[in-house]
Image (cartoon, rainbow, N blue to C red):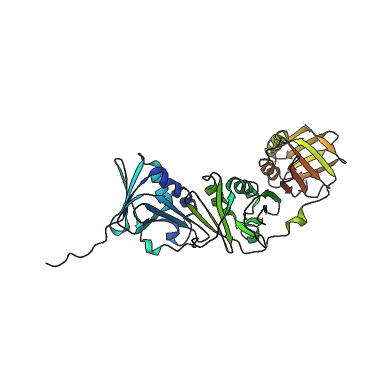
Amino acid sequence: MPKAPFTRQHMQFKIKKTEFLKGLRIAQSIADRKSTMPMLANVLLRLEGDDRLRVVATDLNVSLSANLNSKNKGEGGITVGAKALHDIITNLPGEEIEVKRADNNWAEIRSGKVKYRLVGMPDRDFPKVPDHSDTEFQQVDASTLRSMIDHTLFSVSNDETRFHLNGALFESDGDSSRMVSTDGHRLSKIDKSLTGGPKLTAGVIIPKKGLLEIKRTLDGIAGNCELSIKTPFLFLQGNDIHLVVKLIESQFPRYEAVIPKNNERRITVDRGLFLDALKRALLMSSETRGVKVTLGSGQLTVNSDNPDIGEVKEEIEADVSGEEVSVGFNPKYVVDILSQISTENILVEIGGELDPVVIRPAGDLDFIGVVMPMRI
């Protein structure tokens, strides 16, 4: 009797909804829907043995692979639209999801009485992502790394013609670390103790999208994460998530040169009062018309006028030392800096009316913000 032809069993798996979303949440933000390569908008789902599902997404610069707990039958994989899959899984009822590869690389997704069918593509066409298996990792505190990103992400440049400013500079000697970013209009710099961190001979530039995905990954990690920098990649892992970020290979500007060292005028002021005054002044400002801050005796005056709308003036009590001066700037830049400071009081250091303004938490030298002035 002739043997029946061998047919590979269709891949299928069952997985907890929360477990699946752990990987898909980051995967769908990495997948590149604007790329000319349709595959980069997809997420790869591949069975690993009987009890692991590998979820992979990449835009060729940032890559994620997540190893998730699942119950598998058959073998192989499939790729489907990352955002569509994430949105479907998020809205499905029930705690357990069943996924099966059907004919022509369609994916059948079931939960309770709901059944979806998604168009898929063969897993063999999915691009390879950088391998982290032989990478030596260092254990570092996840909350410290997340804080450093929070304090610098807002001042990364979005101008793609200034490639070297499209990320944050990261420096580390194994004990302490520094992150710096600037868009040419403002600069932020933070120093933190990062015991056990990587020992770098030179700083590396982490691109903005990489910073966003690192932060998103760190949000799900309590305690330590694992970090490794092996040019041209940064590797991060924790909570079964493995992230690889391609570093920007360029020269970051000499940032120390633009941070004033001896501004003679110093003001200590309540952070909340100053922040609220700037937000109110922001209502009267525009891209070309900023806010003017004047130092007086025992007070700051925040002024903004716009011929098309109106004007506002507010006085705030402050501890002022140095001669009277007025300086103009884009209030949004200062609001962004103040929003990253948690101390009750801040220290503002001003040179002349056209010199960069330094802002830092009072009594804390870890973080510093610098804002370039505007002519008003």
Going by the picture, which residue comes out furthest to the right?
A: 323
Q: Quadrant of residue 184?
A: bottom right
How far across and down, in percent of the image, does residue 129 sit?
Answer: 47, 62
Position of the N terminus, as image quadrant, is bottom left
Left or right relative to 190: residue 131? left
Q: Quadrant of residue 256?
A: bottom right
Position of the C terminus, as image quadrant, is top right
* Between 18 and 313, the one nearer to me in the picture: 18
* Between 246 and 208, the one nearer to me in the picture: 246
Residue at point 48%, 58% (across, down): 58
Left or right relative to 349: residue 334? left
- In the rendered view, tell whether residue 118 sits above or below residue 248: above
How far across and down, in percent of the image, does residue 115 sit?
Answer: 30, 45
Residue at point 76%, 46% (across, down): 358
How far across and down, in percent of the image, does residue 162 sit?
Answer: 65, 60
Residue at point 72%, 47% (across, down): 368
* Between 50 and 315, the one nearer to me in the picture: 50
- In the rendered view, tell whether residue 87 sits above or below residue 318: below
